Amino acid sequence: MEHIEHITWNGKLLAYIIRAEVNAEQTAFLTPPEFNFQVGFVAYPAGGEIARHVHRLLERQIVGTYEVLVVKKGRCLIDIYNDERKLIATRELYVGDVILMVGGGHGFRMLEDTVFLEIKQGPYTGLDEKERF
């Protein structure tokens, strides 16, 4: 899809940036099925519906934490780092942009008052889950 950037280092995916102008005409997932977090577009025609359902209780073992951030307000820079904590890329994010972080590290610098919608795996452990560098 146009306007979707994959940021990689040595063949390892670190992040996806999905720009606000991306709009899918058909269902398409951006992440491979083996990822522990699934992000994609699900498209339905007018009059379509999603049948009512519940999700079965499945036990999953998850290692690591993927994060999805949606820029709801403002503008910022994201710095993306590899596993060795070296800066790999800096990108500007705008309202409506989405970033999925799957590897390495990251940091943000706000250019305007900024609000994110953050989505990540739980449960929240209450422990300091971040290692700052």
Image: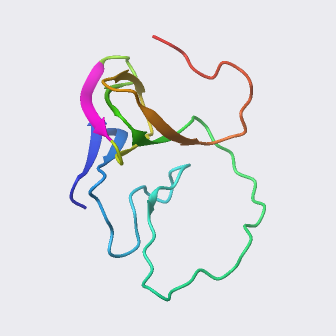
Residue 101 in the image: above or below residue 3: above
Name the residue at the left extreme: 2
The image shows residue 15 at horizontal and vertical percentages of: 36, 39
Q: Where is residue 114, by image quadrant?
A: top left
Is residue 11 visible in the rendered image? The answer is no
Residue situated in front as seen by the camera: 103 or 124 = 124
Residue 31, horizontal then vertical, whole percent: 42, 55
Residue beneath the point at 29% across and 50% down: 19
- Residue 107 highlighted magenta (yes or no): no
Identified at 54% across, 16% down, the residue is: 131
Q: Quadrant of the N terminus?
A: bottom left
Coordinates of residue 84 in the picture (x, y in percent): 37, 18
User: In the rendering, at what x and y percent does residue 30 appear?
Assistant: 38, 58
Left or right, residue 26 beside residue 129: left
Closer to us: 10 or 13: 13
Residue 106 placement, left or right of 120? left
- The quarter in which the C terminus is drawn is top left
